[in-house]
Amino acid sequence: MVRRVCYTTDMEVSIQDNERLDDLQYAGLRLIQRPGEYCFTSDAVLLSNYARVRAGGTIVDLGTGNGVIALLVAAKTAAAQVVGIELQPEVARLAQRNVVYNGLQARVRIVQGDVANAAQLLGKECAQTVVTNPPYFPMPSGLKRATPSAALSRHESSCDLNEWIRSAADLLQWGGSLYMIHKTERMAEVLSALTARNLAPKRVTLIFPKASKQADTFIVQAKKGGKHGMRLDTLIVYEESGAMTAAARKLYHKSDSATAL
């Protein structure tokens, strides 16, 4: 049975002893996080800067975690509605608290459920845009995390890469776009899975920590029903000195002063 849980907005939000409040450095947004559990990384911030939707459209964030991407795309786009889906009930409750804390209840909704059942929870072809920062590592490989919650956020469990992309395809309207960030070591898998679901990769951005290092992540935009033809871009995040590059500063809405991420 598919269970749908939406959280009410008439709730008091307070910061608990095991939590901290982080500044997202955009539009006054703040995020409640729990040290020791999974905390967002620069990958989430980068992805939110690439996502696009037409004014009044709907964005679905698959695997929303504590809600960081959902909040950022709500602030950075003219979407009428952003829906975040999160498997873990306690993490979904934290995401909803973040929505309420930032006063975005009118535009951001959190649904607790499995990404594999996303179309059953929300309805097929309900979104113009899907964004996702999925678990990077197949079970049981990759870096192990200290807590079950953190491990689930990094390792595929109930929903593997192919199922994740299938769900995105089911949610998207014809001509809609998926924006996904993933590890370069799995790029071939990602592009193959996208193509198999009629999601044509249209733009891939390779992300280099520094020019002297290999790209470790990439962002792909794939269009449902799109024609073949892909643009390849690069983004270097840091200068060799450790200062953020001009391109990265622009994405992060930072001044021209050297600022570490």
Image (tube, grey):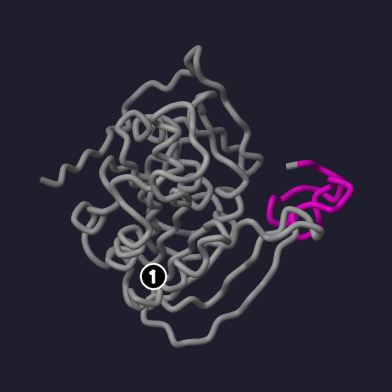
Disc 1 designates what residue? 193
**72 on left or right of 113:** right
Count of residue discs = 1
- Rendered position, 202 above or below 253: below
Q: Residue at x 44, y 27 (%)?
A: 147
**37 on left or right of 86:** right
- Rendered position, 230 above or below 37: below
Mark 1, Cα crowd under 10 Å, few <14 / some 14-19 / many 20+, is some
In the rendered image, the residue lying farthest to the top is: 17
Task: Report if residue 160 lies within the magenta region.
Answer: no
Start-end of magenta stretch: 237-260
**117 on left or right of 189:** left
* Quadrant placement of the C terminus: top right
Disc 1 residue type (three-letter): Ala
- Rendered position, 220 above or below 231: above
Q: Residue at x 54, y 24 (%)?
A: 35
Q: Of helix, strand and loop, which one carries label 1? A: helix
In the rendered image, the residue lying farthest to the left is: 1
Task: Report if residue 247 lies within the magenta region.
Answer: yes
